[in-house]
Amino acid sequence: MNIVNILEEIEKVDGEIYERLNPRRAAMKDFFNMGKKITLAAMPLALGSVFQKAYGQSTPTAVNDVLNFALALEYLEYHFYNHALVAAPTLTIPAGAATAAITLIRDHESAHVNLLKGALGASARAEITYAMTDFTAGGTFGDVYSNYGTFLAVAQGFEDTGVRAYKGQAGVLAGNAVLTTALQIHSVEARHASHIRQMRTALSGGTTVYKPWVSLGASGQANDSGVPQVDAVYAGEDATVQAGVTITGINGNANITKAVAVECFDEPLDKASVVNIANLFLKTGFKL
């Protein structure tokens, strides 16, 4: 989750968001510079203040909907990792670097939850608790909390979904003081996905190599996870045309194959598709 994507989603329902923020560019610059000096615990209050100033006394319902959608996804990610660390006695995460990595990712997700709750204030959606989740996806991943390999495979699906769902479009922020910080936050999310992939490679002893980025799977489709049940996460990632330009064989270069072209670009995932994926991990009665 990152501020670039939050603002991008808000722009879809409020085309004037940047105009609202632009007159306060100096204040925005101070805020994001301040973010380097204050703790994560203080950031939600600061971000909430920015939105209040941009919109006056209240935030439009449509904007709150975007932020609450983001909050729901962050709750899911937090509970997925937190349960693995504190309440899954049959799951053995290797001590040392592996446990440290999962703990750090969990803490990042917790910080994102607190950030969004602070921005939404009283408009924040009801908390999604662990009891509302089903990380087996209805039994599809029945051993997710007893098999470390399955746990990492599902983690990869979550992280790759997050990168696609909240992919930043830095171009809309060109010239805005928020750009630098937003890109820094987005890069952390991408590193989660990359690191989980490298952890899967390490677990296999190197016999199966998961590249740090999305690439073509053995079937020639974009799902390189080796888990066909998560095909929806990678739908559309095998695109070879960007901005109307065919990337394969570009400029007569035969070395630019489909596999190379796919790895060069991330593809966005629309909200409806993300909701469908998220709902796989929520019990009936609690779906988004």
Image (cartoon, grey):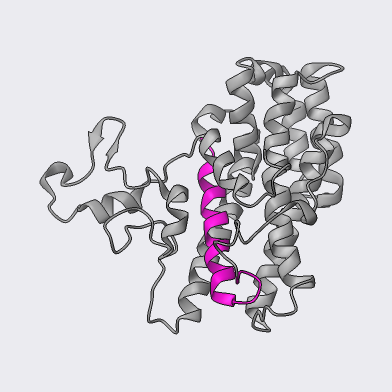
- Is residue 167 among what the camera can see? no
**Residue 78 in the image, given as x and y percentages of width and height:** 72, 56
Side (left or right) of 29 relative to 167: right
When the figure is inspected, residue 254 is found, relative to residue 195, above or below; the finding is above
Side (left or right) of 198 relative to 60: left
The part of the image, by quadrant, that contains residue 69 is top right
Side (left or right) of 178 relative to 220: right
**Residue 273 in the image, given as x and y percentages of width and height:** 51, 38
When the figure is inspected, residue 171 is found, relative to residue 212, above or below; the finding is above
**Residue 266 in the image, given as x and y percentages of width and height:** 42, 46
Where are the magenta residues, as a range?
A: 143-169
Quadrant in which the C terminus appears: top right
- Is residue 250 among what the camera can see? yes
The part of the image, by quadrant, that contains residue 32 is top right
166 part of magenta stretch:
yes
Quadrant in which the N terminus appears: top right
**Residue in view at x 79 percent, y 55 percent:** 131
Q: In the rendered picture of this protein, how many numbered marks are placed on residues? A: 0
**Residue in view at x 42 percent, y 49 percent:** 234
**Residue 21 in the image, given as x and y percentages of width and height:** 70, 21
**Residue in view at x 64 percent, y 17 percent:** 14
